[in-house]
C-alpha cells in the first residue's frame, strides 16, 4: 500500500500525502501553486473558466482530456499528467498555435474566460483529425461540441471558433506541440503506475484509492458510511456549493478492473463502474444509435470526460439523462457487497426520490445493456431550455419491438423529469402492446401517459408542459411508423381532445 499520490504538473513531479479529502484541484493550483491562470468562475463545472488538461494512459495510450478543475478533487490526479495554461507555451516562450490564433482572430475580449477556452481548444487539437476541422460542416460541429462547456460573457464565440479553425489548419500542417511529446510523457506516466492501493490520511479525513474491485469491496464493507466517488461531477458540488465535509472517500476510478467496457459474446454491452461517458461513447453510439444526439448533450465535454456512466445511474437523479436511455434498452445493474453479487433490472433499482435498492457496503460494478431486438424502433429525445449543457425538463427514451405484421409486440417507454425517479410509463406501454401502429393506438398511449405521471411544476417547466411534451414525444416516435400522418401540432391538438374528452 502507498500513502501518497504522484503526478506531474508540467515537468515537475509531485508527491502529496497530507490532503484534505475535499481539496479541489482549482484551489490547490491557485492557493498553493500560484497558478492563477486557471480561473474560478461558477465553481460548479458549468462555465469552463477553470478548464485544465489531464493526460492519462488509456489502454496503454496517452490520452488528453479537458476537465473542470473546480470539481476535480486533488486525489484524482494520482498517476496523471496535468497541464495548465502556464504549461502550453514552447520552451522558447513561443505561444501555442491555439494561443497565437486567439491573438490573431481577436478571440479574447475581457479575457477572463480565455484560459479555459484555450485549454479546451488545445485538448481538441491533441485528439481530433485537425485537417477536417477547417472549413467543413462536420468540423464546425466538432468544434462547437468541444467548446460547449466554455461560456464567454462577451459573446466572442465567432472569433473563438475562427481561431480554432486557424489553429487546426496550422497544426495539421506543422504538427501539434504537445502531441510531439507523447513518447516522453507516456514513459513518465508508466513509471508512476505501480498497481498499489493508496491510503491518504490527514487531520480532515482520509481517502482510499483501491487498486482493484476486490480492494474496493473490502474497503467499502469495512466502512459502509464512506462516500463512493467516481467522476465527482455531482459530489464536487457537495463540496463547492454545500460546503460538505467528507471524512472518508473511497475512489471508484482507481480500480483498474472496473474500467472494462466492451461487447460480450451475446452482443450485450458491458460498461464498468469506472468508465466515463467519453470513454464509453463510441461503443454506446454503435450499440444505441438513436441515443447518439442525446448522449452528446449530457453535460459538456469536460463533464463527460469525468462523469461515469454508472455514477450517473447511482446518484439516482430524477433528471439524469442516462438512466431513461438504459432503462428503455432493458439494462440490468450488477451490484456487489464484499464477495456477494446480485443483478437488478435497472427500473427496479430506483425505489423513490433519494432511495435506491442498494444495501450498506454495496456498490455498482457495472451495467449490462442487452442488444436491441431485430426490428426495434427507437427514439431518444431530450427537451431542455438550452441545447448544450442544460438539465432536461423532460427526457424520453423509447424502444418498440415490432412484429412482421406491423403490430407492436412490446414497448419500453422510460421518462426522466416526470417523477421523483426515472420511471417507465406502464399505462402507455400497455396501450401499445399488441396494437398496430395507428393513430388510434397513439392517441390511447398519449392519454395513458397523463395517468402514468403527476409531474411537478418548477423553474424548468410546469406540470402541464411536462405532461404535454411527454405525450408529444410519442407522436414523434410514431411519425415514421405512420406514412401520411398529420404534423405534430395537429397530433397534439387531437391528443388534447381525446385526453380531455
Image (cartoon, rainbow, N blue to C red):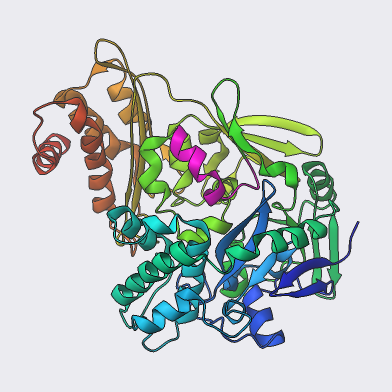
Q: Is residue 172 left or right of residue 246?
A: left
Residue 284: in magenta span = yes
Q: Nearer the viewer, residue 115 or 231?
A: 115
Q: Which residues are magenta?
A: 272-287
How far from the left and from the top, in percent, is residue 208? 80, 58
Residue at position x 56%, y 81% in the image: 38
Vertical relation: 18 (above or below) 315: below
Predominant SS along the magenta part: helix
- Quarter holding the N terminus is bottom right
Vertical relation: 437 (above or below) 495: above
Q: Residue furthest right?
A: 1
Q: Nearer the viewer, residue 391 or 32?
A: 32
Residue at position x 54%, y 35% in the image: 346
Residue at position x 36%, y 87% in the image: 109
Residue 47: in magenta span = no
Residue at position x 69%, y 66% in the image: 81
- Quarter holding the C terminus is top left
Q: Nearer the viewer, residue 64 or 393?
A: 64
- Residue 158 at least partly seen: yes
How far from the left and from the top, in percent, is residue 179? 58, 63
How far from the left and from the top, in percent, is residue 455? 34, 49
Q: Is residue 112 left or right of residue 50?
A: left
Residue 442 found in image quarter: top left
Q: Nearer the viewer, residue 445 or 151?
A: 151
Q: Residue furthest front?
A: 174
Amino acid at each position: 500500500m502507498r500513502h501518497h499520490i504522484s503526478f506531474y504538473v508540467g515537468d515537475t513531479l509531485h508527491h502529496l500525502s497530507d490532503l484534505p479529502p475535499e481539496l479541489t484541484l482549482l484551489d490547490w493550483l491557485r492557493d498553493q501553486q500560484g497558478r492563477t491562470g486557471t480561473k474560478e468562475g461558477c465553481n460548479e463545472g458549468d462555465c469552463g473558466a477553470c478548464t485544465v488538461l489531464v493526460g492519462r494512459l488509456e489502454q496503454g495510450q496517452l490520452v488528453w482530456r479537458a476537465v473542470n478543475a473546480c470539481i476535480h478533487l486533488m486525489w484524482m490526479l494520482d498517476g496523471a499528467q496535468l497541464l495548465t495554461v502556464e504549461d502550453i507555451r514552447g520552451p522558447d516562450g513561443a505561444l501555442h498555435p491555439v494561443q497565437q490564433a486567439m491573438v490573431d482572430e481577436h478571440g479574447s475580449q475581457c479575457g477572463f474566460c480565455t484560459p479555459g477556452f484555450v485549454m479546451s481548444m488545445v485538448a481538441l487539437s491533441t485528439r481530433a483529425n485537425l485537417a477536417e476541422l477547417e472549413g467543413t460542416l462536420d468540423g464546425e460541429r466538432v468544434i462547437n461540441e468541444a467548446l460547449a462547456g466554455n461560456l464567454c460573457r462577451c459573446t466572442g464565440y465567432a472569433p473563438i471558433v475562427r481561431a480554432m479553425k486557424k489553429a487546426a489548419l496550422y497544426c495539421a500542417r506543422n504538427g501539434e506541440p504537445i502531441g510531439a511529446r507523447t513518447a516522453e510523457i507516456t514513459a513518465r506516466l508508466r513509471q508512476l503506475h505501480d498497481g498499489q492501493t493508496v491510503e491518504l490520511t490527514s487531520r480532515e479525513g482520509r481517502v482510499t484509492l483501491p487498486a482493484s474491485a476486490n480492494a474496493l469491496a473490502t474497503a467499502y464493507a469495512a466502512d459502509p458510511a464512506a462516500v463512493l466517488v467516481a467522476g465527482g461531477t455531482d459530489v464536487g458540488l457537495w463540496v463547492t456549493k454545500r460546503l460538505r465535509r467528507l471524512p472518508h472517500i473511497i475512489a471508484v476510478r482507481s480500480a483498474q478492473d472496473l474500467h472494462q467496457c466492451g461487447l460480450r459474446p451475446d452482443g450485450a454491452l458491458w460498461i464498468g463502474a469506472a468508465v466515463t461517458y467519453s470513454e464509453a461513447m463510441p461503443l454506446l453510439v454503435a450499440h444505441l444509435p438513436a441515443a447518439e444526439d442525446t448522449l452528446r448533450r449530457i453535460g459538456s465535454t469536460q463533464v463527460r470526460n469525468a462523469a461515469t456512466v454508472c455514477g450517473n445511474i447511482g446518484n439516482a437523479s430524477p433528471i439524469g439523462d442516462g438512466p431513461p436511455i438504459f432503462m428503455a434498452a432493458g439494462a440490468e445493474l450488477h451490484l456487489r457487497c464484499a464477495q456477494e453479487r446480485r443483478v437488478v433490472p435497472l427500473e427496479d433499482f430506483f425505489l423513490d426520490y433519494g432511495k435506491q435498492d442498494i444495501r450498506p457496503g454495496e456498490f455498482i460494478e457495472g451495467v449490462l445493456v442487452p442488444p436491441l431486438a431485430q426490428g426495434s424502433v427507437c427514439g431518444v429525445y431530450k427537451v431542455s431550455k438550452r441545447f448544450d449543457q442544460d438539465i432536461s425538463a423532460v427526457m424520453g427514451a423509447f424502444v418498440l419491438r415490432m412484429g412482421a405484421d406491423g403490430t407492436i409486440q412490446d414497448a419500453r417507454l422510460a421518462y426522466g423529469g416526470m417523477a421523483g425517479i426515472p420511471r417507465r410509463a406502464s399505462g402507455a406501454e400497455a396501450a401499445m402492446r399488441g396494437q398496430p401502429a395507428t393513430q388510434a393506438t397513439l392517441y390511447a398511449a398519449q392519454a395513458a401517459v397523463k395517468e402514468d405521471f403527476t409531474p411537478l411544476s418548477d423553474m424548468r417547466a410546469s406540470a402541464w408542459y411536462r405532461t404535454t411534451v411527454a405525450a408529444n414525444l410519442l407522436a414523434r416516435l410514431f411519425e415514421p411508423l405512420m406514412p401520411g400522418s398529420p404534423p405534430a401540432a395537429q397530433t397534439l391538438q387531437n391528443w388534447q381532445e381525446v385526453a380531455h374528452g
